[in-house]
Image: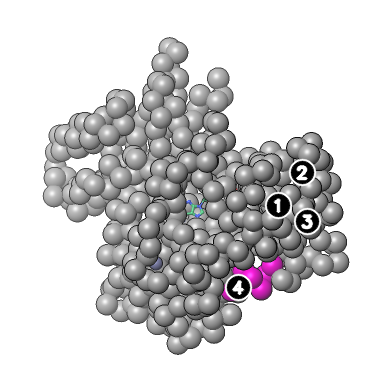
C-alpha cells in the first residue's frame, strides 16, 4: 500500500517541474526573510529570479552546520516567532546542538511524510505502535509520534528509559510496531530475554530503526531476536527529523520524500556533484519548509543516490544506507576507518555479540586502535573452564579486522553484558587523540 501515490509515484518530469517551482518559491522566501541567505546570494550576484528550474539549484550557495551555529539560535528562522509552534534541536552528536523552529505547516508536512513511511513498512490503523525514540528536543520521539497518529494507528509513547516496563508493555498490549535506534532495539531485546518473555509471546512485526548508522548484520540480529521486520528510517533535525527518507518493502535503499527535500551528492573536498551510484556527501534543500528552510545543507552524511527504478512503484529517488559521517570517519595511521566497517566485521563472527567500542589513541606518535567486543554468552558457557578460547577469539577478530581495515588493531574480548548499553544514539567511538 502507498500512502500518497499522487506524490510518491509522480512521473519524473512532473516531479522535476514541481521541484523547480517549489525551489523558486523557497529561494524567494528566504531571500526576503533571512539576512544570511540574502547576503550570500548577493555576494554571488544572484536574485530569486535566477532560480527557475530545479537544475538552477547548483547556482545556490551551500549551508553548513557552522552557519547554523554562527546564527544560533534563531538567525536562520524565516517565519516570524508568532508562526512557530514548536522547537527541536539536533542531538549534538558532533558539537553544539542547532535549534530548529517549525510552523504548523511544517508539522503537517512532517506528519504526512511519516505516514508515507509507516505505510511503506506495512503499518496500518489496527496496529499498536510503540515509539521508543527519546521524546523532547530530539526530533525522533515527537516526529514519529505525530506520524502514527496521523495514520490512525495507536501510538504508545514509551520513549527511552523504563526498558523493563516497556518490555512488559510489548507483551501485555500486544504491541505490533516499534520505532527506536537500532542500538536501543538490541538493548530492549536483551531486557525482553532476561525478563523471561518468549519471542512467541510478542506480537511485534514491524520496526522503524534509524537515527544512527546500522548494518545489514545488525538488522538480521534485531529481526531474529525481536521477531519483526526491521526497516530503515533516516532523517536529521536541520531538514525535518525522521522520515526524510524511508525504506519500502523492496528494502533496496531508502526513498527520499523528494517533493519536500531535494537531494544532491557532492564531493566534500571539491564540492562538485557526484554521479548517481557513487558515494559522496549528501546535501539537502528543503522545498516547502517555512519555519527554518535551508538551501543546500551539507549533512556530512556519506552515501550514494541509487540509479534506476524501484519495483514498488514509487518514483522518489533512493539513497543507499549511510556509510558514515565525514566527521565520524577516523583517520588512523593515514587510513580511513568507518565504525560501520568494524561493525560489519564483528557481526559476521558468530562468537561476537553486537556490543562493541572503538578506542583510538596515540602512543609514541603512533595511532592505535583498540576494539572491545563482548563475546556471546553461549560461546563462553561452552568453554568457561579455559581462557584460551578468548585468546583464540581475539586473534581471529584481529585478523578479520586487519583484512577489512588494512590496519592492525588490538582486540579485547569482553564478558557478556559488561559494556554500557545506550538508550538514544550509541556512542561507540572514543578518540583520545584529541586530548593530546
Ligand atoms: P546530530 O546527531 O547531527 O546532532 P540529529 O539528531 O538531527 O543530529 O541526527 C541526524 C543524524 O543522524 C543524521 O545526519 C545521520 O548522521 C544520523 N542518522 C539518522 N538516521 C540515520 C539512519 N537511518 N542511518 C544512518 N544514520 C542516520
Ligand atoms: Zn521502493
- Given this view, does label 3 or label 2 mark the residue nearer the observer? 2
Considering depth in this image, is 61 or 24 the residue closer to the camera?
24
Secondary structure found at label 3: helix
Question: Which comes before the other along the chain, label 4 or label 3?
Answer: 3
Residue 268 is situated, as x and y percent measured from the top left of the image, at: 54, 35
Q: Which mark is residue 28?
A: 3
Query: Does the magenta segment cover residue 219?
Result: no
From the image, tell me which residue sits under label 4.
111
Residue at the outermost bottom position: 126
Residue at disc 3, CB closer than 8 Å to ligand 1: no
- Against 22, is 436 above or below? above
| Structural distance between the alpha carbons of marks 3 and 2 | 11 Å
Whether the residues at callouts 4 and 3 have beta carbons within 8 Å, the answer is no
Give the dominant element type of the magenta stretch: helix, strand or loop: helix
Question: Which comes before the other along the chain, label 1 or label 4?
Answer: 1
Residue at the outermost top position: 364
Left or right, 251 with respect to 158, comes to: left
Say whether residue 373 is visible. yes
Instruction: Find the magenta span and give its range.
Output: 106-112
| Structural distance between the alpha carbons of marks 3 and 1 | 9 Å
- Given this view, does label 2 or label 4 mark the residue nearer the observer? 2
| Structural distance between the alpha carbons of marks 1 and 2 | 9 Å
Residue 400 is situated, as x and y percent measured from the top left of the image, at: 22, 35
The N terminus: image quadrant: bottom left
Residue plotted at (58% across, 56% down): 262
Whether the residues at callouts 1 and 2 have beta carbons within 8 Å, the answer is yes
From the image, tell me which residue sits under label 2.
46
From the image, tell me which residue sits under label 1.
51
Question: Which comes before the other along the chain, label 3 or label 1?
Answer: 3
Amino acid at each position: 500500500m502507498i500512502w500518497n501515490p499522487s506524490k510518491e509515484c509522480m512521473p519524473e518530469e512532473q516531479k522535476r517541474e514541481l521541484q523547480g517551482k517549489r525551489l523558486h518559491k523557497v529561494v524567494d522566501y528566504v531571500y526576503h526573510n533571512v539576512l544570511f541567505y540574502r547576503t550570500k546570494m548577493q555576494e554571488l550576484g544572484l536574485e530569486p529570479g535566477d532560480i527557475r528550474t530545479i537544475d538552477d539549484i547548483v547556482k545556490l550557495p551551500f549551508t553548513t552546520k557552522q552557519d547554523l551555529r554562527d546564527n544560533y539560535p534563531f538567525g536562520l528562522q524565516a517565519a516570524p516567532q508568532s508562526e512557530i509552534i514548536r522547537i527541536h534541536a539536533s542531538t549534538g552528536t558532533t558539537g553544539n546542538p542547532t535549534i530548529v523552529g517549525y510552523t504548523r505547516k511544517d508539522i503537517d508536512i512532517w506528519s504526512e511524510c511519516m505516514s508515507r513511511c509507516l505505510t511503506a513498512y506495512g503499518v496500518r490503523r489496527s496496529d499498536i505502535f510503540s515509539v521508543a525514540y527519546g521524546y523532547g528536543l530530539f526530533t525522533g520521539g515527537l516526529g514519529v509520534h505525530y506520524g502514527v497518529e496521523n495514520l490512525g494507528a495507536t501510538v504508545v509513547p514509551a520513549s527511552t528509559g523504563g526498558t523493563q516496563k516497556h518490555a512488559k508493555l510489548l507483551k501485555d498490549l500486544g504491541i505490533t510496531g516499534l520505532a527506536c535506534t537500532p542500538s536501543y532495539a538490541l538493548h530492549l531485546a536483551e531486557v525482553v530475554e532476561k525478563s523471561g518473555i518468549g519471542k512467541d509471546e510478542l506480537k511485534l512485526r514491524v520496526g522503524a530503526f534509524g537515527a544512527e548508522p546500522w548494518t545489514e548484520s545488525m538488522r538480521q540480529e534485531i529481526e531474529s531476536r525481536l521477531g519483526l521486520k526491521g526497516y530503515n528510517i533516516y532523517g536529521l533535525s536541520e531538514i525535518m527529523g525522521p522520515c526524510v527518507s524511508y525504506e519500502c518493502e523492496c528494502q533496496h535503499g531508502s526513498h527520499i520524500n523528494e517533493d519536500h527535500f531535494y537531494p544532491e551528492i557532492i564531493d566534500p573536498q571539491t564540492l562538485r556533484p557526484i554521479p548517481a551510484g557513487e558515494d559522496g556527501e549528501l546535501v539537502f534543500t528543503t522545498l516547502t519548509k517555512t519555519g527554518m528552510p535551508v538551501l543546500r545543507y551539507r549533512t556530512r552524511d556519506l552515501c550514494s543516490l541509487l540509479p534506476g527504478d524501484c519495483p514498488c512503484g514509487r518514483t522518489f529517488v533512493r539513497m543507499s544506507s549511510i556509510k558514515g559521517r565525514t566527521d565520524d570517519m577516523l583517520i588512523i595511521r593515514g587510513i580511513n576507518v568507518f565504525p560501520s566497517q568494524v561493525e560489519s566485521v564483528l557481526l559476521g563472527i558468530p562468537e561476537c555479540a553486537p556490543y562493541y567500542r572503538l578506542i583510538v589513541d596515540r602512543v609514541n606518535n603512533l595511532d592505535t586502535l583498540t576494539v572491545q567486543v563482548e563475546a556471546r554468552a553461549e560461546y563462553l558457557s561452552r568453554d568457561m573452564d579455559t581462557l584460551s578460547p578468548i585468546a583464540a577469539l581475539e586473534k581471529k577478530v584481529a585478523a578479520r579486522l586487519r583484512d577489512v581495515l588494512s590496519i592492525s588493531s588490538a582486540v579485547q574480548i569482553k564478558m557478556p553484558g559488561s559494556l554500557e548499553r545506550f538508550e538514544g544514539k550509541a556512542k561507540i567511538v572514543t578518540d583520545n587523540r584529541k586530548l593530546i
